[in-house]
Amino acid sequence: MRNLLSMALTACAATWLLGAPTLADTPVTYTDEGRALFRFDVPDFWTLRTGGPREIEDTDLGDARAVSRVMGIKPVTDDNVWMGFVSPSRVSSIKGGLRYLEDIDKFLVKDPTVTSTSDTRIGGLPAHVVRGTGNRDGRGVNFTATVIDLPRDRVAIGVAILRDGADPSYVDALNAVFVSFRSLQ
Amino acid sequence: MTRKVMKRSVLALGLGAATFTLSACDGVTVGVGYGVGYDPYYDSMLWNDYYHDRDVDVDVDINRPDRPDRPNPPARPKPPIAKPPSRPHPPVARPPAARPPIHRPSPRRR
């Protein structure tokens, strides 16, 4: 009888442990008008927020602006880290992507200071990386903006933001996202 | 003894089953406004000036009339030249005048 009890407890414990989610990233595909552009892996215990193409209007000036799908990921329990991807329409080269980046970084980060830029390859595609610092909501942030040249006249723009005081181990998670980046064309 | 162990195992298994039943409720509920709060970076990445034609210089105030000149400020009021009459004061007793003593002993004669 005692054996039975211990076996039952063991079974319970085993179910609990095996019931925990196994460590596997979640692949996500970025599509635009039904066309799959690229994919990346969302790390475990991160949330993904997807948007869609839409127009946003300035309430003061009344001019509508086209916005492509923005996908944002961040850890479920931490607001110090954020990463976003967007593939803006009608932006076809790294140069155009950098101009697009200039037009959004003033909203993303205040007083941005570029510390380094480099040309690299992400997922086998040419990419341009801009690293820098700035501040947001009174706190310093580190940002890494990446323009990845996708085939067929598209680019992917990825922005990773680490606020001051963020757990440094998140850098690995962010790099893992870039490592998992693949073009789907 | 056997009965006691039976009771215990039933309790343990029952608690385990209850835990599963309770945890099954977690995570499948659909809530509104849960988890998505203030997401400044996401909102900022939406906004861009890229498609905004930056080369066109639009003067919004083109039909606005010129601003009128500032009116001259009114002259500062001057203080009155004559002082207003002072209020009547009630009579005040004058202090006693300091007089030399009336009588002074003369120096002693020798």
Image (spheres, rainbow, N blue to C red):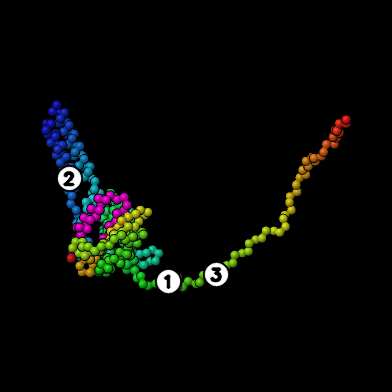
Q: Nearer the viewer, residue B81 or A121?
A: A121
Marks 3/2 same chain: no
For marks 3 and 2, give the one nearer the viewer.
Answer: 3
For marks 2 and 1, give the one nearer the viewer.
Answer: 1
Residue receiving disc 3: B69
Q: Chain of mark 3?
A: B
Residue type indicated by callout 3: Asp
Residue type indicated by callout 1: Asp
- Residue B9, compared with residue A33, is above or below; it is above
Circle 3 SS class: loop
The magenta span reads A156-184
Which residue appears at 12% of the width and 36% of the height? A7
Q: Is residue A116 left or right of residue B75?
A: left
Residue receiving disc 2: A19
Q: Nearer the viewer, residue A117 or A164?
A: A117
Q: Quadrant of the C terminus of chain A?
A: bottom left
Coordinates of residue A183 in the picture (x, y in percent):
19, 63
Which residue appears at 39% of the width and 66% of the height? A61
Residue receiving disc 1: B59
Q: Chain of mark 2?
A: A
What is the distance, in whole Å, between disc 1 and disc 3 at their CAs? Answer: 22 Å
Structural crowding at the residue carrying mark 1, measured as other residues with C-alpha within 10 Å and reported as few (<14), some (14–19) or many (≥20): few
Circle 1 SS class: loop
Q: Magenta stretch: residue A77 in it?
A: no
Instruction: Of the two numbered discs 1 and 3 on the same chain, state the one appearing first in sequence.
Output: 1
Structural crowding at the residue carrying mark 3, measured as other residues with C-alpha within 10 Å and reported as few (<14), some (14–19) or many (≥20): few
Determine the image quadrant of residue A51. bottom left
What is the distance, in whole Å, between disc 2 and disc 1 at their CAs? Answer: 64 Å
Determine the image quadrant of residue B22. top left
Residue type indicated by callout 2: Gly
Circle 2 SS class: helix
Residue A89 visible to the viewer? no
